[in-house]
Amino acid sequence: MDDSLKLKKATYHLYTFMISKMVSTFGAQVYTFAISFYILQLTGSATSFATNLICNILPRTILSPFAGAITDRYSKKKIVILSQIATTLTIIILLGITLTSGLSLITIYITTAILSLTSMFSGIAFTSSITSLIDQNRIQKAMSLNQMAISFAAIGSPAVGGVLYGTVSIPVFLLIYIGASIIAVILESTMNFKLFVTEKQPVKGEQKESMWQSMKAGISYLKLQRIIMIMIWIGLLVNFLFGAFEVGYSYILIEKLKMESQHFGLTQGAFSLGMLVMSIYFSMRKEVRFPLLVSKRGIIGLGFILASITIPLLVPMSYIVQVGYYMFIMVTFGAMIIVVNTPLNVMLQKTIADEYKGRVFSILETMSMALMPLGMVLYGFLYDILPAHWVLIVSAAMLIIVILSMARPTVVKRAHPEWEGKRLTLLKGKVKSVSS
């Protein structure tokens, strides 16, 4: 295939990937919205809500390294399609159970764990295939369009979920998810996952490495990437502290402030709107020059936003003002998430060798989420026994301290040596302007 045809196919991938992600995410988030409300209204417990989150995170954390090794050894396209088909079949089975014997917490937890695994395989396979699907000059655009698709779906799904919840039964939510998953399978089957891959010729007599050897090779490769290792440790601690938001936000709005499902859906949609606006910005601007520095500033901003979630608990507000306040907070929160994630993802796509991407991205996912189950258990317990505002404020302060310590100037300089030169030039300019 000549270069012009490759670029046309890459353009097709850009938008097919975007539409596929938007459709599948819409179905998944409508389902998640309904299940979250169902659990909280059934039990009224932050611990039960946190348990469902743990069922989503724990399987991914344990099995992600194996998923990475499998992704690097086998066809990524087959892994993506089979994962999406498994998702569809799981929801069909859940629909059958719901219609025949009713929905129970145990059934929800098991389904969440299975969907977590199918999503993990599909996500790692797609993430490690970006540079095979899209040309190098449009990697940031691809990452931004992908996030735009997720944001579009996430804007609509809480609104749809909020309107439907309480007026239709859970099976309707499951049917929406099934339909979305089937469309995603059809779209993904049309993509060429080897468009920009240069096939390596096998060496005669060379034995294929075992799964364990493959995983060890991925770890050995990662150990040589010092900046990526620092990013892993930052992700580990930041995601642990983000348990305060994952458990606390829904708990505070639904249980403490008694927000109606429609209005809670609006705040969730506002979060996605913020992500969408910032994704559009990144899709149009040139590539970020100092990704780690930008992400560091974004995480500091997230810390302040996390603390601000507590204000309606401390300052009396009318119900309408509360809804408006949380919509504003979540728009900002969503935008800041993109500021943190997009530059780092582009940096990783261009830094990691193609043959190691599946394993490295899976290790990144495992390590970044390793403490999240513990965080969910801890925060579920803390929210049940302590004032919610203190849990959030202390967690926000710890988040800021962690990022200032681990992404200190010497680390940023190591990741971006040219940044130090630019910083010194700016400082000299300021000194001259003051002296004059």
Image (tube, grey):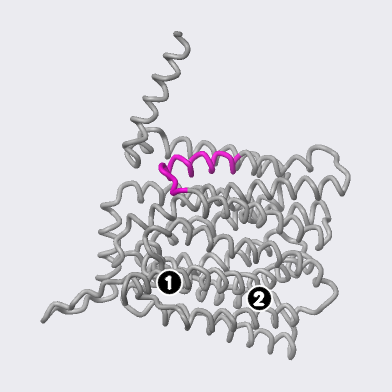
Badge 1 crowding class, 10 Å Cα cut-off, few under 14, some 14 to 19, many 20 or more, is few
Q: Give the CA distance from mark 2 to mark 1.
A: 43 Å
Furthest residue in direction right, as rendered: 318
Q: What's the residue at 49%, 79% (across, down)?
A: 188
Tell me where residue 261 appears, x and y as whole percent.
81, 63
The C terminus lies in quadrant: top left
Q: Tell which of 116 and 110 is nearer to you.
A: 116
Q: Tell which of 153 and 99 is nearer to you.
A: 153
> Mark 1 is on which residue type?
Lys
What's the magenta region?
A: 286-303
Q: What's the residue at 49%, 53% (across, down)?
A: 342
Task: Please indicate whether residue 7 sits to the left or right of residue 21 in the image.
Answer: left
Q: Is residue 51 above or below residue 284?
A: below
| Residue 432 quadrant | top left
The N terminus lies in quadrant: bottom left
Q: Main secondary structure of the magenta part?
A: helix
Q: Which residue is mark 1?
A: 8
| Residue 124 quadrant | bottom left
Tell me where residue 321 appears, x and y as whole percent.
84, 45
| Residue 54 quadrant | bottom right
Nearer the observer: mark 2 or 1; the answer is 1
Disc 2 to disc 1: CB gap under 8 Å: no
Task: Please tell me the numbered disc located at residue 322.
Answer: none
Q: Which residue is mark 2?
A: 108
> Mark 2 is on which residue type?
Ile
Furthest residue in direction top, as rendered: 436
Q: Is residue 327 above or below residue 197?
A: above
Task: Please indicate whether residue 69 sits to the left or right of residue 59 in the image.
Answer: left
Task: Please indicate whether residue 206 sits to the left or right of residue 325 in the image.
Answer: left
* Secondary structure state at the residue bearing disc 2: helix
